[in-house]
Image (tube, rainbow, N blue to C red):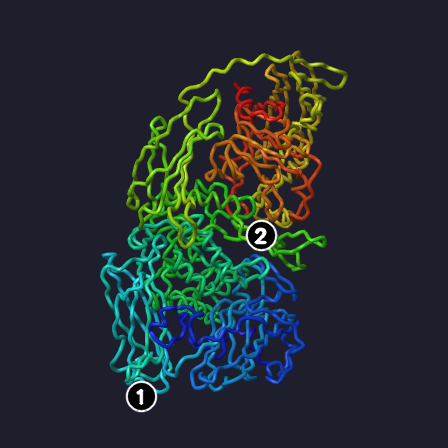
Amino acid sequence: MNLAKLFYTSPEAVGLRRLPVRATLYPFDSVEAARAVRKESSPFVLDLDGSWAFRYLTDPAALDETVADPALDDSGWERAEVPGCWVMHGYDHPHYTNVQMPFAEMPPEVPAGNPTGVYRRAFTLPEAWAARRNVLHFDGAESCFLAFVNGQLVGGSKDSRGATEFDLTGIAHAGENQLTVVVIKWSDGTFLEDQDHWYLPGLSRSVYLYSTPQAHIADLFAKSTLKEDLTTGLLDLELFYGVPELKAADALEISAKLYAPDGSAAWEGLVRSAKVEGMFGNGSDPARLACRSVVELPDVAPWSAEAPNLYTLAVAITDESGRCVDATSTRIGFRRYEVRRREFLVNGQPVRICGMNRHDHHDTLGKAVPYETMKLDLVTMKRFNVNAVRTCHYQNAPEFYDLCDELGFYVVDEANIEHHAFYNDLCRNPQWTAAFADRAARLVERDKNHACVYAWSLGNESGLGANQAAMAGYIRFRDDSRLLHYEGAVSGQWVDCVPNRAVTDFICPMYPSIEMLVRWSENNRDDRPLVMCEFNHAMGNSNGSLKDYFEAFDRYPGLQGGFIWEWIDHGIRQETPDGRAYWAYGGDFGDTPNDANFCTDGIVWPDRTPHPGLYEFKALAQPVGITLLDAASGRIELFNRRWFTGLDDLALDWVLEADGRRAGGGTEPVPATAPRSRTYLTLPVERPETMPGEKLVLRVSLKLKNACAWAEAGHEVAFGAFELPALSVAKPLPAEPLPTGVKKLADRAELLAGVLTAQVNASGITAMSFGGAELLKRGPRLNLWRAATDNDGIKLQLEESRTGWRKALHVWTEKGYDRFRAVPDEFAALGDAVELRSMVSCPGIDGIELEFTQLLRPLPAGAVEVLSTFVVPPEFDDLPRLGLTLELPPEFANVEYFGLGPLENYIDRDAAVWPGLFRTTVDEMYVPYIMPQENGNRTRVEFAAFRPGEGAGLLVTAPGGMEFSASRYSVDQLWRAKHTCDLTPESVIYLNIDLRQRGVGTGSCGPDTREAYRIAPGRYQFSILLAGLPEKADAAKLARSLVN
């Protein structure tokens, strides 16, 4: 195995004995059979996935020549599933880094300890295939592999995500054959795959064998576009085929047949029936001859993400007798991708890219992502109004593009290149040019027939050099029907300059602030559109200010959307010794160096459950805008934001609620509405008489009339919610005032409001009861701190990053916000009230204090008013929150509130919620972000009630509005925990009542929370009312009566 090291540390050697890369095609024996397209339908494909014999070695040096010997007895070896990643099954360990390499060696050298897996299995070649051409196909192996059949080396490759094929002619024979694959974890290719994900070696994608006749279709490129009239399809068909010898080609005829989306014949014709020409025009390569045909087709059904119309193209070789020798097929879509005058146009329309960056990830299988999971990802994306995917940072499996073609996605297909740790080195090093060019060719040649692909990406975070120019040269020559995308060409210079045009047709920056986007739009004269390749980093409790980005897209020319980073948290499922599941991240497997939980930065959890941020995205990307024009008449406007389709597939439902009580509703037909146009309708809304303070909310919903490929009938695609003014207000009889009083004792006081009593000392309320039943154990106490979100700062990397990219958390912990101390300074009875004053200090702020005052006053309505005053000096700038914490009995777990809901929301993430009366529980309010952190907040809340079942409870109202969350975990416990399994429910419920909490922003990788969503120094007052809620009482009525 001396060949192995020479191969896996030589970047010039990109592969051994590989066949030319080609489109994903399967052989059939007739045109009719080929219409099935799928691999599973071909009678000439032998699936090699499943259980293989497996042997794990710590270094390829341990390999010997017998490992590929067909006679080797592997019956005692372990078993491994293919596709699979051996580190997910107990061998070696997963390793996560972001930018830094997982080892110290310099390219192209790799560690001496280099884990290696040997896979073996037998396969039976049918007798009828013995005289045919048989090809061994690998969809991907990480990071380098060598393949042996019957003891003979058939070839090797390094691109972990690229398809690789080897010709087994003269090697495989009829009957049983032995296949051995040696997979090596680290190679020179690893330096090109430094991709902010786990290193998960193995045969991570499918392996199969297919058989063709000796005269066979080798490859085809069906370049299917639209002419400028946008109705005429242009099919430019280039076909490569092989023959056993050149003279045999003259007796063959190649024909093609195109089937429309409904299955009818759309066109058929000969591709060639005359003299053959070789690939290089000299007929010298009988294995790869070329022919071409260009056809115009009137009135085609165009492909778009909204209407993914797919045609099936079947191609056949027939002999002189008319017998079909070989046939294959692919699906195509007629579309036109171009850039004009700062607009990216799809079929002439400047579509908005509402996209996601998607890594391959499965929480128990690693990068061996099953087809069903790929489909779940894409179906979920469609349900949440995602229309585009960037395949970060490599080609996905071929089936993924089939699904994107079918379901309708615009795809940026990315070459398997990221050398972030050597950013401007490898891209300028001629020793690596072959590897760059090879990966570009493998990207384009495999995926060239997919309608969904609108741009080829040259990779990610890999600087800019001649090697990208080599990639761009190949791609532009090979495919002029698509565009180029590469962020490295614009990095750091796009705002005020006109960056390199040779390697990108887009301005595609990472994580720009909204201010940068506006400056570019208003001042830069670059005529290319701006589509962010990564933005609004979704790590943990995130996706703040997404609404502001979408408003910028609407307002400023040239801004055409972008791709959220990223789709899925890359947590790996683990269990504690007592069986509690959690998701692990970098460092949890002893992997050093690592980048901690930076891999858990998705907008869905590893089990594909959506984060609240995905609902925010759905609301902002919804295909219909709904505007209330006149509350009195119920007149609304529908704006069809689609570019190609009407609203015929949608039905409209509406409901009117008065403090959660249904007061009207119905279903209305949606008028015919052309793309990008508006229509109007009047809803028969009759506003009922309301009580003082009672809120009327109209919610309008647009839903699918019928089931489709990605959702059931009734799925909501868009909504609008509006508060309506009251038409008439009832005048309730005034309630009898209740007795109130303040009793001052030595070091405490007692407040009385009817049957509500509260015990108070210098620190605040120490107990509260209602008719003898306990309502409150402690509080409301000052609260300035929150369990930092990932966007506030990566707490596991806090110390090592203090001198680098400084985040809010660095400042907060340096000032000591997490250790603030409130010292009682004054405790006085003022007739009908008690006043408390504390001076608040932080260990990192010398000599300056925040002043906190509370005035507690019992009210005749049966409540205690808590009027809090905060005097925040400039030194206490940008506090995490300004609020209060109360401790409730643990059984007060049923929650009812009027505010924005039903989802978690923050002042900079509230597009997916609406005002209403919502019922939930403390346990349901908890949001289990992989790194425990601030969660569960609700904003614009007017009142909240907490009780055990229907029993008596606590009512909190805020005349000026409030934010709140309730949790069984203290802020301190959430702050100190590293995994969800570290959390233990406490003996109280922590109720956080805030005047204001800092927005969540998107600062874990990107701009910090915007100034508008922070807390500035100044003087603030905050009033809340605490009252007892009688058993089975209507919380809303009582809350409204207290305020009014």
Q: Which residue is mark 2?
A: 598
The secondary element bearing badge 2 is classed as: helix
Horizontal and vertical percent position of residue 676: 30, 44
Whichever of labels 1 and 2 marks the residue nearer the N terminus, that label is: 1
961 or 1003, which is in the foreground? 961
**Residue 442 visible within the image:** yes
319 relative to 689, above or below: below
Q: Which residue is mark 1?
A: 247
**Residue 1019 visible within the image:** no
Q: Say which quarter of the image contains residue 43.
A: bottom left
Horizontal and vertical percent position of residue 128: 44, 84
Q: Report how far apart the C-alphas of labels 1 and 2 lie in the structure.
A: 60 Å
Q: Say which quarter of the image contains residue 319.
A: bottom left
Q: Residues within 10 Å of mark 2 (few under 14, many from 20)?
A: many
Q: Hey, what amino acid is under mark 1?
A: Lys
The secondary element bearing badge 1 is classed as: helix
78 relative to 803, above or below: below
Q: Is residue 343 left or right of residue 205?
A: left
Of the two numbered discs 1 and 2 in the rendering, the one whose residue sits closer to the viewer: 1
Residue in view at x 41 percent, y 55 percent: 709
Q: Is residue 842 left or right of residue 13?
A: right
Residue in view at x 34 percent, y 72 percent: 32
555 or 710, which is in the foreground? 710
Q: Say which quarter of the image contains residue 221.
A: bottom left
Q: Hey, what amino acid is under mark 2?
A: Phe
842 or 751, which is in the foreground? 751
759 relative to 434, above or below: above
